Amino acid sequence: MNRQIEVITSDDAPECPRCGQEGLLYARVPNGWYNAAGARVEGYTGVVLCPACDTQDLHAAPLITWFHVNGEANDEDQEFVRLFIAWATNVFVPMLNEQALEDEIEQWRRGEL
């Protein structure tokens, strides 16, 4: 399987959606689910590497350590690339909560968002 993973760069550190603290890295990883008709829907979702939330994750912890030692991401550093791929290919992406999505769409339609 060929999974294209995109690192999103910015001057600002990404905010962790789980805890609100400053993250180390934002990436878009492939994600998919089956819709109500049973058809596979493929797309991408954004994930943040968070030094607070991800320290116990087997694949994230070495990458977090790499950032603490080396600072910024460097796609020419083979160690960074190896650690990044290990994290990104194993990152947990929660299943789509279709009811929450529908509720958010309805709030948006009413002008509440």
Image: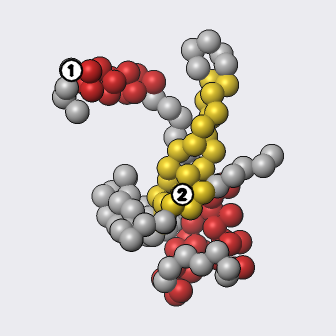
Binning the other alpha carbons within 10 Å of mark 1 as few (below 14), some (14 to 19) or many (20 upward) gives few
Q: Residue at x 35, y 60 (%)?
A: 15
Image position, residue 74 (x, y; %): 59, 78
Q: Which residue is mark 2?
A: 27
Q: Is residue 100 left or right of residue 89?
A: left
Type of colouring: secondary structure
Amino acid type at image mark 1:
Arg
Q: From the image, which quarter does the C terminus lie in? A: top left
Above or below 91: residue 30: above
Residue 110 badge: 1
Q: Earlier in the sequence, mark 1 or mark 2?
A: 2
Image position, residue 34 (x, y; %): 62, 24
Amino acid type at image mark 2:
Ala
Above or below 99: residue 72: below
- Mark 1–mark 2 Cα distance, whole angstroms, equals 31 Å
Q: Residue at x 64, y 75 (%)?
A: 75
